[in-house]
Image (tube, helix red, strand yellow):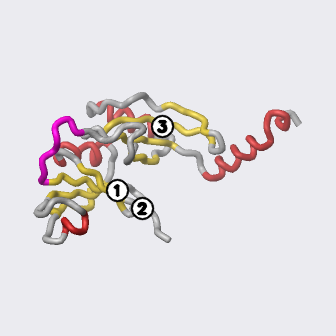
Amino acid sequence: MVGEIHHVAVSVRDLDRSIPFYRDGLGLRMTLDMRVGNETMHERLRVPPGTTGRAVYFQGPTRIGQVELIQWDLPVPAGARPGRAGEPGVFALSFPVAAEEIRGLYERLVAMGVDCYHPPATSVLPGYGPITMFMCEDPDGIRVEFVSLPTPEQVRAFRAAERSGPAEEGR
């Protein structure tokens, strides 16, 4: 059995352009900035022999899970973009945000010039309850979701109300 995610590694075109988004925009703490590459890396990671790069790790307040941004010293194909809906691969990075902080985060990102898809909006997920979320893209076009989730107690109450149904509510 495995534990929680240790980190997610994301390739970026320009680390110096990406760092402000994750550090200043999202408020993540930069924990490591290092050069990567050695004589066995091509075997272990299946990258071309001699590949090197720079990696920066970011961590949230709980210190569970990290985002690693890597700028490889390899040519980036013209027009290369992250995968889109329906294509295999990571669809989005998702970060929890407290309900009382989600609007402020949205406004901070917009003020930084980040193109957010929409303002925070609330939806009700069947079997789960109401969530508030918005999405944007990081400087490389990677989708990033911010979501305010119900507590486990709120999820249990929502599920209990769903099970009792409309006929039970009038009793």
- Residue at 41% across, 37% down: 85
Answer with left or right where residue 52 lies relative to residue 30: left
Q: Do the residues labelled 1 and 2 touch (CB within 8 Å)?
A: yes
Residue 115: mark: none
The amino acid type found where label 2 is placed reads Ile
Residue 29: where, in percent of width, then height?
A: 30, 55
Please identify, in this view, whether the residue under mark 2 or under mark 3 is nearer the observer. 2
Q: Which of marks 1 and 3 is nearer the N terminus?
A: 1
Answer with left or right where residue 35 lies relative to residue 56: left
The residue singled out by tag 2 in the image is 5
Main SS of residues in magenta: loop
Distance CA(mark 1)–CA(mark 3)? 21 Å
Q: Which of 160 and 49 is in front in this view?
A: 49
- Residue at 37% across, 55% down: 60
Q: Is mark 2 on a helix, strand or loop?
A: loop
Q: Give the range drawn in magenta.
A: 73-80
Q: Can residue 67 be seen in this view?
A: yes
Q: Is residue 51 magenta?
A: no
Q: Nearer the viewer, residue 38 or 167?
A: 38
Label 3 Cα crowd, 10 Å radius (few <14 / some 14-19 / many 20+): many
Q: Is residue 76 magenta?
A: yes
Q: Are marks 1 and 3 in contact (CB under 8 Å)?
A: no
Q: Earlier in the sequence, mark 2 or mark 3?
A: 2
Quarter of the figure with residue 37: bottom left
Label 1 Cα crowd, 10 Å radius (few <14 / some 14-19 / many 20+): few
